Amino acid sequence: MTTSGITDSVLIIKLGGAILTDKRSTCTLASPSNLDSIFHQMLSTYQQSSQKLILIHGVGSFGHPQAKEYSVKEGTSKNQSKDVRAGLCLTRAAVLQLHARVIKDLTDLGLPVVSVSPFDHVMTHGGIDASSSTSYEHLCRRTQALLDQGYVPVLHGDAILDDKQSCTILSGDVVMRELARSILRTSRCIFLTDVDGVFDKDPKSHKDAQLIQEVAITHEISQSDAINGVADVTGSMHGKMKWARQIVHDAPGKVDVVICRQGTEASRLAMSGAAIPTSAQLTIFR
Ligand code: IP8
């Protein structure tokens, strides 16, 4: 630990779109009390944890419906009648509306948050899967510089430019993976969401669903019953599991990845940076 009490280790938290917004209707926020509780939790994490903090947020109903309607993820690689540029503009307008709210509320609480725009720093080459980590170098350098100066960088899922298909969608989950690969001394990545973690079945429709508390990264889970029915162009829980595995696998140092429910004791424990007992009601990937 340094003399200021801040260690060099870094905690990256992603606030899921499902907790910040109401995904059942377009551009609708979660209730004021939920938002208040999420932002106060970020404040106490910042105040109590000895780790440096990076925040990423998903976009939920502020971006997924617009991106889906205009196939922004596929860009010009898909023959479509709709104007993909209009789709990118509408998607970004919605994303930035949510982002401005997140930044304002956290600033009002006294957190030294600074916005980092994926759109301005990332360009892909034929979609996310075809693009290498070099696409994210600028974004990661900018984030590291802010962190080094004592800020809390805040990033988000975004619509971005792609030099082969004109545009695509960059999920906050992928941003998490790239930051974990590149930001020095990242020790834990947390996905804060509206379920306790990964289940063997969809817990929203199956009462007997079992929480999987620990996942070794070689272990395959077949979650055939995905949480669907809402517009989510970046893969919902399937996507999270894929990126969680990749983070553990690709990070240069030892990184835990946790998926947990916002507002629970388990989420507080995860955010404190403390070791997580096997009994905790969350999913940890190691
Ligand atoms: O909510 C998606 O980001 P996510 C970004 O983190 C857009 O998956 C614009 C749909």
Image (tube, grey):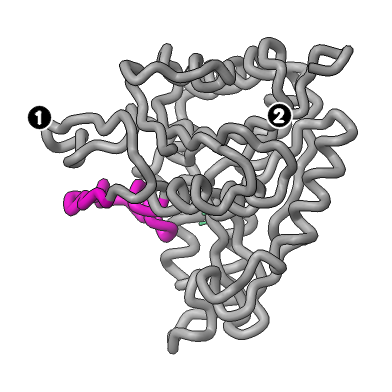
Dot label at residue 76: none
Please determine whether, in this image, residue 80 is positioned above or below residue 58: below
| Percent position of residue 281, x then y | 33, 20
Vertical placement of residue 194 versus 164, above or below: above
Mark nearest the camera among 2 and 1 is: 2
Judging from the image, what secondary structure is the residue with disc 1 in?
A: loop
* Badge 2 vs badge 1, beta-carbon distance below 8 Å: no
Q: In 3D space, how far apart are the residues under numbered discs 2 and 1 (Cα atoms)?
A: 38 Å
* Image point (70%, 50%), residue name: 182
Q: Which mark, by number, is residue 208?
A: 1
Circle 2 residues within 10 Å: few <14, some 14–19, many ≥20: some
Identify the residue at horizontal 63%, vertical 17% (top origin): 45
Q: Earlier in the sequence, mark 2 or mark 1?
A: 2
Look at mark 2 in the image and give the residue it sits on. Answer: 9
Answer above or below: position of 213 versus 94.
above
Left or right, 198 with reference to 204? right
Tell me the magenta residue range. 220-239
Residue 214 position within the rendered picture, expressed as x and y whole percent measured from the top left? 33, 32
* Residue type of the residue flagged with mark 1: Asp
Q: Quadrant of the C terminus?
A: top left
Residue at 75 percent across and 52 percent down: it is 140
